[in-house]
Image (cartoon, rainbow, N blue to C red):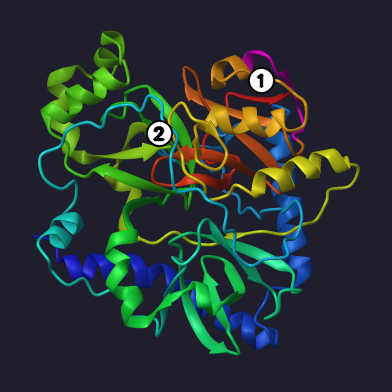
Amino acid sequence: MINVKRIAAIAISGVFSVAVLFAIMQDRASAEGFAASEEISGAIVMVNDYCNRVASGELFATDPVLLAQGDEARASVEADAVSGAEESADTDNSDGLDAESGMVPAEMDMVGPATEIESAIQDGEHINLNLNYSRLGIANKVSNYLNVRKKPSKSGQIVGKMVKNSGCHIYKVEKGWAKIVSGKVNGYVKAEYLTMDDEAEAIAPEVGRDCVEIMTDSLNVRALPSVTAPIYSVCDSGEEFEIKKESVDREFLEKIIEKENISEESIERAGGMDYLLEHMNEFICIMVDDDYAFVSKDYVREQFSLKRAVRFKYDPETGESSEAYGIVAYAMQFLGNPYVWGGTSLTNGCDCSGFVMQIWAHFGKGLPHSSAAQAGCTTSVSTPRPGDLFFYGSGGVSHVAMYIGGGQVIHASNHRDGIKISNAYYRHPLKIGRP
């Protein structure tokens, strides 16, 4: 039996201890502990160049020139988010609690917990989450998200955003402001919106999740637990995906095949049902947006993780229209709001196509409520600009996100994450379209 306390410690403390070490090194170079603006700008230029090259067809996430070994591919890139406009408040308090009615796909029945950490929580075991950092903070006293600012003031530049239940390491609290680090974001947040110390550790098992982190430069995510199964998507190094089920059994696999409508041809390509049953425990079933897929255990790290802040920097790209950044600013208001399959409410719940449909409707552009249909009525572009749509899927389009600049997209991902920000190439896009 895996030591549950050790797993959780590696998961949470590992994320923050690396971030804390990085921040301490930055502190030695800067009194406030922030990276120099030149470094941030350089990262944005690098990411935008990468985005442009992929969008133009010059590079592909699966380009043989970039392949390393097995399922690995060298297409790693660090992205900086770009904001649409700075807000006056430090937390978004829009009412996003009541999901609108609509058809919701039935959850697959599972006997017992999906992972050993869930089992430990259900059995009431204590999980030690705080070994390598001194103070845990969780942004759970907000409706949607909490602004991270460069200075402890409401007039301070917004450098990141913590969606609800994100975790952070707290350096200190002074005059109502907490100096924190979360993921790659350093800054200050209003302390009143954080739960701290022992109380934070007590709620962490409830708001955290069991994830896998991609440990190769990029990884082929499969539709079935086999290295010869059809490729569902290509996901980048460092991306985290929630574990749906750690140990797959025949009943679960059959339900996956039925839910995802996987063909007999695909099953045979993967080695046949007998082969899948023999090798299925070499893979982990994960959630990719609102779909199920499989990754090899050899190329991922399992960890219990809290959500992390996303970097956010308003830096309009040269030549872009004010309308493009107005779209981004409008979309960012709904960061952290809930996902509802079939929904179209930006506050009470929407799915991926409902989200971009409503964002563009606000600016007078009508789009259908279907990611595949949206792909069909948008014009392919070689260079993405804010407001353009990234379409993802396996074989056909099944998910859509909106580009916000800086190499990132905002999208309604799934029931657990809601509306979130991701690297634009967290999955290989099938198309980039302009409404």
Please name the amino acid that badge 2 sits on.
Asp
User: For this view, does 198 lie left or right of residue 59?
Assistant: left
Looking at the rendered image, the quarter that the C terminus falls into is top right
Asked whether 356 or 384 is in front, the reply is 356
The answer to whether marks 1 and 2 mark residues whose Cβ atoms lie closer than 8 Å is no
Q: Which residue is tagged 1?
A: 367
| Quarter of the image with the N terminus in it | bottom left
For image coordinates 71% across by 53% down, the residue present is 82
* Corner quadrant of residue 138: bottom left
Q: Which residues are magenta?
A: 375-384
- Residue 319, image x and y in percent? 91, 42
Q: Determine whether 16 is above or below 344 in the image.
A: below
Q: Earlier in the sequence, mark 1 or mark 2?
A: 2
Q: Secondary structure at mark 1?
A: loop
**Residue drawn at 25 percent across, 20 percent down:** 257
* Residue 290 disc label: 2
In this rendering, the answer to whether 235 lies above or below 266 is: below
Main secondary structure along the magenta-highlighted residues: loop
Is residue 382 located in the magenta-colored stretch of the structure? yes
- Verify whether residue 430 appears in magenta: no
Q: Where is residue 75, by image quadrant?
A: top right
Q: How many marks?
A: 2
